[in-house]
Image (cartoon, rainbow, N blue to C red):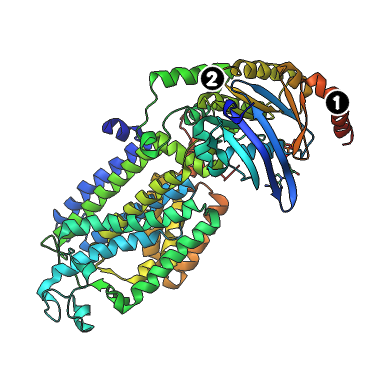
């Protein structure tokens, strides 16, 4: 497959922190509409991969292309986000002093320039969309609560809701079910499967039950590069993967 | 759309504050001009000027709270913008002296004649016109803030480092304005004003007029700031304060937002300085001193950071206390101020307004909403 047909194209991406290689010549292709699960032991570089895609960290070498043409390595965070790349952080980060509603309003797809936000008024469409997301994330009764007062799981959901509000082409979701009950985990899996198709999704998760639930192609990262790729059953049977997980 | 925007920020607290300001704008002229000097209701010209001065400081505190309370930029140099606005107004007032100066030069202010200057420096041109000075009062602090913010925010200087360079900015300006060859009167500054817009600057009616102008400026500043913080832009500002990098990942260029609030705040501070100078009758480089900016931070902290109204209350109360203390126990004032700051930080982290909100919450009958606390930086 050539770079033009991909939504996201990473080739030979390396990042070092004080001589430590967090990403080591990483290559990854994501097709439009695809959902991909990324697994790997702690410190494999999963979060760092999201950092280089979203402009938080600049790669030392390598190519990162969005929609086959836009070079992300030359852009800043806000510009990358406005291309249509949204992110949920490993540690849920919401705006704690704002209400649940305001968090969603801030994330909602709308012009981002100061003069536009100064004169912004919630229109009917925007209100309906926020209501819809509140229902999807089951946060409707808590819409007026300050986000800081939500439980860990609720913050996870709010952040997923913010991702939906942003309506990005590519969603990067870092450990969405950490701290969730089994029932919540199952709901989250269903939600992400709904989203995929219209959007492309990259999910990082340690929870194998959840990954199995997703039922998508899996990429195993280890020491900053791809160790194996394929269905969950295939990679689980891969001897190298078994060694890496058991070796810890 | 403009009315909708302006009504956005007006809650009950704002209503009370604006009512008090309206009352002042009516009562003070009546008491100062409409009563006999021996009446117990009479306000002396001195008192009017003193109250006017407090309200100028209140406008400075309001400007500071907009950036510190809502964007998390702890400016330790806001007095610089205030003083620049003051100098712009002072230059106009100097040009109004005309031939009534000691040396009787119709064009050159006394200090220039004294320095043997033959003609007016280029940057003094235009200041004989009030409208020009009025524009410069906002344009000069605004342009400096814009340039400063453009570089600082773009290079992502934040926190303590940003505070330190704001302090360095005001210190550098102080040193520059102390120099005679800068053309701003050196360490004497600008003084001996005679007239403003043709009115005798010492006359009680002029003093009352300046006081009312200050009340109006403060009310406008308050309405503007309240509307901004209540708008979606205001929500972005608070989000930047609490988790700037998260805001970037939502696609907002946070530098633009900070620059907007910072520049607007500097313009407001400039207006405050411009109203201050004719009421106190002098502007000199000591207003640039780092301590002035730090005092302004204390006013905001005492009143309640991130509440706007608290900044106004804090500025008035602390300066009232300062007038009292410096008359009664002048050598103790700095200790009192320092002690006050320590006490407020330890026991009233949300200031007087935060305390009021807490007390109201304890009383179950009144369902008041607590002021939003100023959060910590995250992400
Ligand atoms: N900013 C940084 N400075 C220094 N080292 C870093 C930095 N960010 C990540 N690292 C290191 O890079 C390695 C990869 O980290 P990363 O967070 O990407 O792992 P991960 O796969 O997301 O792990 P986990 O499953 O625990 O979240 C780790 O060893 C980490 O300590
Ligand atoms: Mg991680």
Q: Which chain does the residue under circle 1 lie in?
A: A
Q: Please give left or right for residue B189 compared with residue B305 in the image.
A: left
Q: Please give left or right for residue B254 compared with residue B23 in the image.
A: right
Disc 2 designates what residue? A134
Q: Quadrant of residue A51?
A: top right
Q: Residues within 10 Å of mark 1 (few under 14, many from 20)?
A: some
Residue appearing at x 25%, y 53% in the figure = B214
Q: Quadrant of residue A245?
A: top right
User: Could you say which disc has been placed on residue A238 in the image?
Assistant: 1
Q: Which badge, 1 or 2, is on the more N-terminal residue?
A: 2
Q: Nearer the viewer, residue A75 or B27?
A: A75
Q: Is residue B363 visible?
A: no
Residue appearing at x 37%, y 34% in the figure = A116
At which x and y percent is residue B370?
48, 36
Q: Please give left or right for residue B258 compared with residue B129 in the image.
A: right
- All told, the count of numbered labels is 2
Q: Residue furthest front?
A: A2
């Amino acid at each position: 497959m050539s770079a033009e047909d991909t939504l996201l194209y990473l080739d030979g991406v390396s990042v070092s922190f004080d001589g430590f290689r967090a990403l080591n010549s990483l290559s990854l292709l994501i097709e439009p509409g695809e959902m991909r699960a990324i697994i790997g032991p702690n410190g494999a570089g999963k979060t760092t991969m999201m950092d280089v895609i979203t402009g938080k960290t600049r790669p030392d070498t390598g190519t990162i292309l969005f929609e086959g043409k836009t070079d992300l390595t030359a852009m800043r965070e806000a510009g990358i986000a406005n291309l249509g790349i949204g992110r949920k952080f490993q540690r849920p980060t919401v705006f704690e002093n704002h209400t649940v509603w305001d968090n969603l309003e801030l994330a909602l797809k709308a012009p981002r320039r100061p003069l536009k936000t100064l004169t912004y008024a919630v229109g009917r469409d925007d209100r309906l969309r926020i209501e819809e997301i509140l229902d999807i994330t089951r946060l409707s009764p808590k819409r007026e609560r300050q986000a800081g007062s939500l439980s860990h799981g609720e913050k996870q959901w709010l952040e997923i809701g913010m991702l939906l509000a942003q309506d990005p082409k590519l969603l990067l979701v870092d450990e969405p079910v950490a701290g969730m009950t089994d029932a919540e985990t199952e709901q989250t899996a269903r939600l992400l499967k709904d989203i995929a198709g219209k959007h492309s999704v990259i999910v990082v998760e340690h929870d194998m039950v959840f990954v199995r639930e997703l039922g998508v192609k899996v990429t195993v990262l280890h020491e900053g590069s791809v160790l194996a790729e394929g269905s969950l059953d295939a990679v689980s049977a891969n001897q190298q993967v078994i060694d890496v997980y058991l070796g810890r | 759309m403009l009315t909708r925007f302006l009504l956005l920020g007006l809650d009950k607290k704002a209503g009370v504050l604006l009512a008090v300001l309206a009352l002042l704008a009516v009562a003070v002229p009546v008491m100062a001009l409409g009563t006999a000097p021996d009446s117990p209701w009479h306000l002396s010209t001195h008192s009017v000027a003193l109250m006017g001065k407090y309200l100028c400081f209140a406008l400075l505190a309001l400007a500071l709270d907009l950036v510190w309370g809502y964007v998390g930029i702890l400016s330790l140099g806001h007095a610089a913008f205030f003083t620049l606005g003051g100098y712009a107004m002072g230059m106009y007032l100097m040009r109004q002296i005309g031939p009534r100066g000691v040396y009787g030069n119709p064009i050159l202010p006394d200090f220039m004649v004294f320095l043997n200057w033959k003609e007016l420096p280029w940057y003094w041109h235009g200041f004989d016109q009030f409208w020009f000075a009025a524009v410069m009062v906002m344009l000069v602090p605004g342009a400096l803030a814009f340039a400063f913010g453009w570089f600082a925010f773009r290079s992502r200087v934040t926190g303590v480092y940003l505070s330190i360079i704001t302090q360095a900015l005001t210190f550098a300006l102080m040193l520059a304005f102390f120099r005679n060859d800068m053309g701003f009167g050196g360490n004497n500054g600008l003084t001996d004003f005679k007239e403003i817009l043709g009115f005798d600057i010492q006359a009680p009616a002029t003093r009352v007029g300046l006081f009312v102008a200050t009340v109006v400026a403060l009310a406008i500043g308050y309405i503007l700031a309240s509307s901004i913080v209540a708008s979606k832009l205001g929500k972005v500002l608070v989000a930047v304060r609490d988790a700037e990098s998260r805001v970037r990942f939502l696609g907002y260029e946070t530098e633009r937002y900070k620059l907007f609030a910072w520049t607007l705040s500097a313009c407001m501070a400039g207006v405050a300085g411009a109203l201050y100078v004719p009421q106190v009758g002098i502007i000199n480089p000591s207003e640039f001193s780092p301590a002035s900016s730090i005092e302004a931070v204390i006013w905001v902290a005492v009143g309640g950071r991130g509440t706007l109204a608290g900044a106004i209350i804090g500025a008035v109360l602390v300066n009232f206390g300062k007038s009292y203390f410096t008359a009664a126990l002048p050598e103790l004032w700095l200790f009192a101020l320092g002690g006050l700051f320590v006490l407020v930080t330890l026991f009233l982290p949300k200031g007087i307004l935060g305390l009021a909100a807490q007390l109201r919450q304890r009383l179950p009958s009144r369902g008041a909403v607590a002021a939003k606390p100023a959060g910590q930086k995250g992400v």
